[in-house]
Image: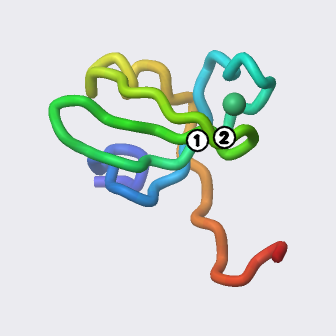
């Protein structure tokens, strides 16, 4: 099983095929269940999507942000 195939978990970062309205396309998983909540890293807004729909929308997984990186 590769990293691309494992289920999404809270804290995972993903890039979606369709950019958010703000222009950002990097999202952080904020809640996992039947529906998955993802938060836009650029503007901070979050959206709730059915799991299957989100998984189809993911272009690729992003590397976790290193602790203390960029701040
Ligand atoms: Zn946004």
Left or right of residue 26: residue 9: left
Q: Quadrant of ligand 1?
A: top right
Pick the front one: 1 or 30:
30
The location of residue 20, given as percent across then percent down, is 67, 22
- Disc 2 is placed on an element classified as strand
CB-based contact (under 8 Å), mark 1 and mark 2: yes
Q: Residue 51 placed where, x, y %?
A: 27, 27
Q: Residue at x 16, y 31 (%)?
A: 34
Where does the C terminus fall, quadrant-wise?
A: bottom right
Crowd around label 1: few <14 · some 14–19 · many ≥20 (10 Å): many
SS at badge 1: strand
Label 2: how many residues lie within 10 Å, few (<14), some (14-19) or many (20+)? many
The residue that disc 1 covers is: 27
Identity of the residue furthest to the left in this view: 34
- Counting from the top left corner in percent of width and height, residue 46 is at 51, 34
Q: Is residue 59 above or below residue 60?
A: above
Rendering coords of residue 5 (x, y %): 33, 44
Residue at the image point whose x is 35% and y is 23% from the top: 49
Which residue is labeled 2 in the image? 26
* Displayed quadrant of residue 53: top left
Left or right: residue 55 compared with residue 68: left
Image quadrant containing the N terminus: bottom left
The residue located at (53%, 48%) in the rendering is 28
Label 2 CB, ligand 1: below 8 Å? no
Relative to 15, is 53 above or below? above
Which quadrant of the figure has residue 42?
top right
């Amino acid at each position: 099983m590769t990293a691309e195939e494992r289920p999404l978990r809270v804290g995972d970062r993903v890039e979606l095929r369709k950019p958010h309205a703000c222009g950002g396309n990097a999202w952080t998983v904020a809640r996992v269940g039947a529906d998955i909540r993802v938060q836009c890293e650029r503007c901070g807004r979050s959206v709730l999507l059915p799991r299957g729909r989100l998984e189809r929308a993911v272009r690729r997984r992003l590397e976790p942000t290193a602790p203390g990186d960029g701040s």
